[in-house]
Image (cartoon, coloured by chain):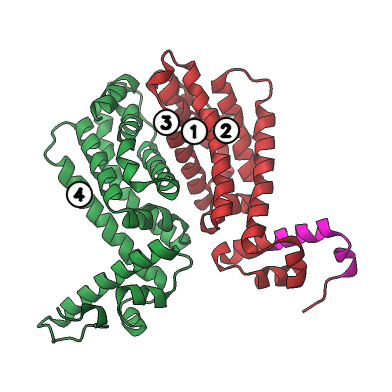
Chain colours: A green, B red
Amino acid sequence: MPHEEELGPLPAGRHGLSREQVTAHQRERIVAGLAEAVAERGYNAVTIAQIAKSARVSKRAFYEQFESKEECFLAAFEIVVSHLRQLVEAAIEPIPDWPHRVVAGLRALLDFLAAEPELARLFLVDSVTAGPAVAERFREKIDVFVPLLRPGRAERDNPRPLPDSTEESLIGALVSMLSRSLAFGDAAALPELLPDFVEFVLMPYVGPAEAHHLAQESL
Amino acid sequence: MNSPAPQQASQPEVERQQLLDALVEVSIRGGYRNATVASVVERAGMTEEAFHRHFSDLEDCFAEYLFEGRQVFFTEVGTAMVGIEEWREQIRAAGYAMLRFWRADERRARMMLIEVLSAGPRAQLIRDEGMELMFDLIDQGRSAMRDPEMLTRTTAEAIGGAIFNQMHLALERGELDRGEQLIPQLMYTVVLPYLGTEVALEELERPPRGTG
């Protein structure tokens, strides 16, 4: 495609694309623009004009796709979550036993966040600070990871049940640690957290000794 | 716009406190992210000039508010732990004191747990220093272990994060009122890595005392 940087809104038809394809492309482009602009300025400070500029579309094109900055952010967020979920599922799929599935899932999560620091910050830092509507959505979305942990309950040989909120609490802990590491540190170093994550997440299910063993093994 | 009353101008502390109160009002109503110096001074019935006698900008105002809140928090939690030797009981005392603190003033809790997230880097730093102190306390659980090297400080950070998240959720769901019901879960989360499964489950079954 020639003159990509000067394109502005993609006119329908010129590329032999249907209106829907143009629209989908346009949305992705704006979402990528948002990620870039937010990485530069932070979600709260960024304006729609800056997002449109990063996406190389007009402000009007932005408003054709999204009603507000928040709506655009939520769209970006959805894309990251569903992508991440696919990655995690692909990583755990071939592995038969539950504890090693968790290890593989956590590894895929950390590798993705380390490879995509801008998206990682968008997902884990900005989403928490972007206001109540986004924070609420964040909590709903993050719950998609609960079913990945729940089967761990069957691994326990202790007859006393785990508290209902165990999975929610573990995921809350991971989110908190990740967002702190991203806010302060180097995203590339995230994979180093793997053994600690493995140990912490598996402990309620397989007990401290086995969790420690699996953590060492994951190194 | 009213000009500031003369007695306020002669009482800088009172004036400052009124501005901090107005910041809370405005932030609770419309979110800190939508607050402006203009909306805060309007709420306080003061001028922007008066505001700038106390704070360089809105971020400064929020940071001061948070700093003072954190002082009170650690004074109360620290006092609750005085004379307690055993780590597990220190955690319990700190847990109850923490819940009392959040419940005593729900608007303050909202400012310190939720609104802080949309505040600037200085406020974040104040919050994070506070969390580090909490992690230190949790991390002392390692000294109760046969092999303290088996865990790292990251475990304490994860537990602290889980607790912070739990408080955040309880506040958003309006569940702080039944705060002491959160204690067994909190104790379970903290002691599990350090004292093991049996002790943790014991905590889960132990009925909470009233927080008064």
| Magenta span includes B38 | no
Q: Give the number of the disc on residue B95.
A: 2
Residue at disc 1, secondary structure:
helix
Residue at disc 3, secondary structure:
helix
Q: Which residue is disc 4 drawn over?
A: A87
Residue B119 image offset from top left, x and y in percent: 55, 58
Quarter of the image for the C terminus of chain A: give it. Answer: top left
How far apart marks 2 and 4 lie (CA) works out to 38 Å
Q: Residue furthest left?
A: A16
Tag 3 subunit: B
Q: Is residue A151 above or below residue A124?
A: above
Tag 4 subunit: A
Q: Amino acid at mark 4?
A: Leu
Residue at disc 2, secondary structure:
helix
Q: Around disc 2, counting alpha carbons within 10 Å, would you say few (fewer than 14), some (14 to 19), or many (20 or more)? A: many
Q: Amino acid at mark 1?
A: Leu
Quarter of the image for the N terminus of chain A: give it. Answer: bottom left
How far apart marks 2 and 1 lie (CA) works out to 8 Å
Residue span colored magenta: B5-22
Q: Which residue is disc 1 drawn over?
A: B186
Residue at disc 4, secondary structure:
helix
Q: A164 and A125: which one is in front?
A: A125
Front disc: 3 or 1: 3
Q: Around disc 1, counting alpha carbons within 10 Å, would you say few (fewer than 14), some (14 to 19), or many (20 or more)? A: many
